[in-house]
Image (cartoon, rainbow, N blue to C red):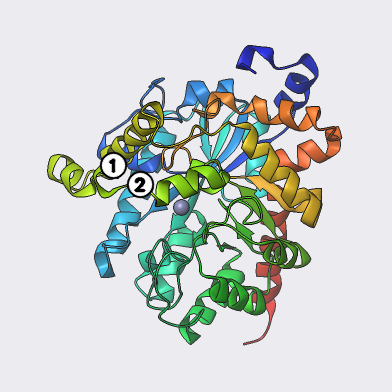
C-alpha cells in the first residue's frame, strides 16, 4: 500500500485526531548539523513539512546522551540539545509551540501549531543529582528514559550487565522525585528487574516511550506480555516503536548473526564524523538500508507496526497503547520512512476492524491522559506534608 492509497475514512479520522509521537531523536540534527526544521530534508525523518503531511500534532524530542558521556558533561550534552530544540521552536513559532502539559498540547492544536515536548533519554544526564532533575523540569522536560544502553549509577539497562539488580536506592528517590514533579517515568531501555522496581516504586502511571512486544520480537528492549499487563494495571501506556530490529524477529536474528565484516563499522565512522552523533545515526541508517539491498538483512514492512499495536491491544486493551517512532534514531521499516507516512497506521488499524474511538486513543489520546494523570499525581504529592 502506498501513501496515496490511504482511504478517505482513514484520512478523515487521522487528520481530526491528535497524533502524538512520543520519541524522535531529531535534536541531534538540530545541535550537530544546525538542521532547520523548516527544510524538507530526505536525509532525516522529521521536519515541519513532513510533520504537517503526516498529521502529527505533538512530538517528544529526545535529548539523548550517549552512555560514554558521563558526569557534568552528560548534563551539558542534554542542555545543549535542549537549547538547540528551544531555538528551533522560537524561530518557527508560527508552526511549533513548546508544550509541557496535555493542556498546552491542546492549546497548540487550537492554534494549528505542532506541540514539541522535551524528554531526556538516559538518566545519567542528571549526574545523580535531584537538583539537576528539578532544573530540567523547570526548563520544560516532561519525561526521562531512566537509562540508555548501559546501567547508570542507579538503574540497570536492558542492554548491559546489571550493576544494581534493578534500581539502586537512589534510583527509587529519582522515581519519587519525578512523580512529585509530574514528570513521566519512561521504562524504555531499562532491564526487566529495573522495570519491576519502577512499577513497585512509582506513585503515578509510567510509560514506555518507544518499545515493542517481546512476544512478536524477542529483543531485551521490548516488553513481554506480563510487563505490558503490569504497565496497564498502573494506568500506563506502551508506545510501539518503528525500529526494524524491535519489530521483526527475522531482522533481529539476521542482525545478530551478521559476520564482523558485514556489521556497521562504528570506529571507522567515528574517525570521519568524530562526536557528531547526527552524522553517526544517519550513517548507521544508511548502512542498514545498504545491507537490506545487498540481501544481508531482511526488509521489514511498516505493517509490523500495526501487528505490534494489535498485539499490545489484545494484551492490555486499547487504553494502554500508543506510538513512539524513534525517527532520526533508528532503522525505519519500508513504507514508514518518515513522519509524512503516519496516516498509514490509521489505515492499517481501520483495515483490522478497529473502531474510530480506539484509533484516536492509540494515536494520541492515551498519551494525553497519562500526562494528565502524572500531573495530577504530582500535585497531590506536592501537597502532602513531608
Ligand atoms: Zn532509545
Q: List x then y, in percent, for residue 188.
A: 54, 59
Q: Are marks 1 and 2 in contact (CB under 8 Å)?
A: yes
Q: Quadrant of the N terminus?
A: top right
Image spot of residue 247 (x, y percent): 57, 44
Q: Is mark 2 within 8 Å of ligand 1?
A: no
Query: Foreground residue, 232 or 269?
Result: 269
Placement of 22 over or under 229, stated as above or below: above
Specify whether 217 is left or right of 295: right
Of the pair 221 and 14, the residue shown nearer to us = 221
The answer to whether 172 is drawn above or below residue 208 in the figure is below
Q: Residue furthest left?
A: 271
Q: Residue at x 40, y 80 (%)?
A: 163
Q: Is residue 61 visible?
A: no
Image-based side of 373 in relation to 161, left or right:
right
Question: Splitting the image into 4 quarters, where does residue 356 fall?
Answer: top right
Q: Residue at x 36, y 33 (%)?
A: 291
Task: Pick out the residue farthest to the top.
Answer: 4
* Residue where numbered disc 1 is placed: 262
Q: Within the image, what quadrant is residue 154 found in?
A: bottom left
Instruction: Indicate the quadrant where residue 382 lies.
Output: bottom right
Q: Foreground: 335 or 253?
A: 253
Q: Residue at x 83, y 35 (%)?
A: 354
Within 10 Å of disc 1 (Cα), the crowding (few <14, some 14-19, many 20+) is: few
Residue 203 spot, x, y in % from top left: 68, 74
Q: Position of residue 101 (x, y in %)?
A: 62, 50
Q: Is residue 185 left or right of residue 169?
A: right
In the picture, the quarter occupied by the C terminus is bottom right
Q: Secondary structure at mark 1?
A: helix
- Tell me the number on the disc at residue 258: 2
The answer to whether residue 153 is above or below residue 124 is below
Mark 1 → mark 2, Cα distance in angstroms? 6 Å
Amino acid at each position: 500500500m502506498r501513501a496515496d492509497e490511504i482511504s478517505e475514512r482513514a484520512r478523515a479520522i487521522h487528520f481530526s485526531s491528535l497524533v502524538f509521537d512520543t520519541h524522535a531523536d531529531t535534536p541531534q540534527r538540530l545541535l550537530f548539523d544546525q538542521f532547520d526544521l523548516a527544510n524538507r530534508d530526505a536525509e532525516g525523518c522529521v521536519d515541519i513539512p513532513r510533520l504537517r503531511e503526516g498529521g502529527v500534532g505533538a512530538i517528544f524530542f529526545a535529548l539523548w546522551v550517549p552512555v560514554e558521556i558521563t558526569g557534568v558533561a552528560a548534563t551539558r550534552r542534554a542542555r545543549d540539545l535542549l537549547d538547540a530544540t528551544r531555538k528551533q521552536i522560537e524561530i518557527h513559532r508560527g508552526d511549533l509551540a513548546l508544550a509541557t502539559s496535555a493542556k498546552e498540547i491542546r492549546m497548540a492544536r487550537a492554534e494549528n501549531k505542532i506541540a514539541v515536548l522535551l524528554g531526556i533519554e538516559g538518566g545519567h544526564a542528571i549526574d545523580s543529582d535531584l537538583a539537576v532533575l528539578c532544573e530540567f523540569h523547570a526548563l520544560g522536560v516532561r519525561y526521562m528514559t531512566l537509562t540508555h544502553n548501559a546501567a547508570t549509577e542507579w538503574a540497570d539497562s536492558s542492554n548491559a550487565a546489571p550493576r544494581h539488580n534493578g534500581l539502586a536506592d537512589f534510583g527509587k528517590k529519582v522515581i519519587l522525585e519525578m512523580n512529585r514533579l509530574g514528570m513521566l517515568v519512561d521504562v524504555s531501555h531499562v532491564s526487566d528487574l529495573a522495570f519491576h522496581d519502577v512499577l513497585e516504586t512509582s506513585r503515578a502511571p509510567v510509560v514506555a516511550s518507544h518499545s515493542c512486544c517481546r512476544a512478536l520480537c524477542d529483543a531485551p528492549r521490548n516488553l513481554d506480555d506480563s510487563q505490558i499487563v503490569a504497565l496497564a494495571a498502573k494506568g500506563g501506556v506502551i508506545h510501539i516503536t518503528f525500529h526494524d530490529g524491535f519489530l521483526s524477529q527475522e531482522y533481529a536474528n539476521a542482525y545478530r548473526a551478521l559476520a564482523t565484516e558485514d556489521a556497521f563499522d562504528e570506529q571507522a565512522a567515528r574517525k570521519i564524523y568524530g562526536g557528531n552523533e547526527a552524522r553517526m545515526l544517519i550513517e548507521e541508517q544508511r548502512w542498514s538500508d545498504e545491507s537490506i539491498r545487498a540481501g544481508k538483512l531482511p526488509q521489514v514492512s511498516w505493517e509490523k507496526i500495526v501487528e505490534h499495536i494489535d498485539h499490545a491491544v489484545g494484551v492490555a486493551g486499547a487504553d494502554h497503547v500508543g506510538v513512539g517512532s524513534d525517527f532520526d534514531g533508528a532503522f525505519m521499516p519500508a513504507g514508514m520512512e518518515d513522519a509524512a507516512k503516519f496516516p498509514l497506521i490509521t489505515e492499517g488499524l481501520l483495515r483490522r476492524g478497529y473502531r474510530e474511538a480506539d484509533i484516536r486513543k492509540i494515536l494520541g489520546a492515551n498519551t494525553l491522559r497519562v500526562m494528565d494523570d502524572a500531573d495530577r499525581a504530582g500535585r497531590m504529592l506536592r501537597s502532602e506534608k513531608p
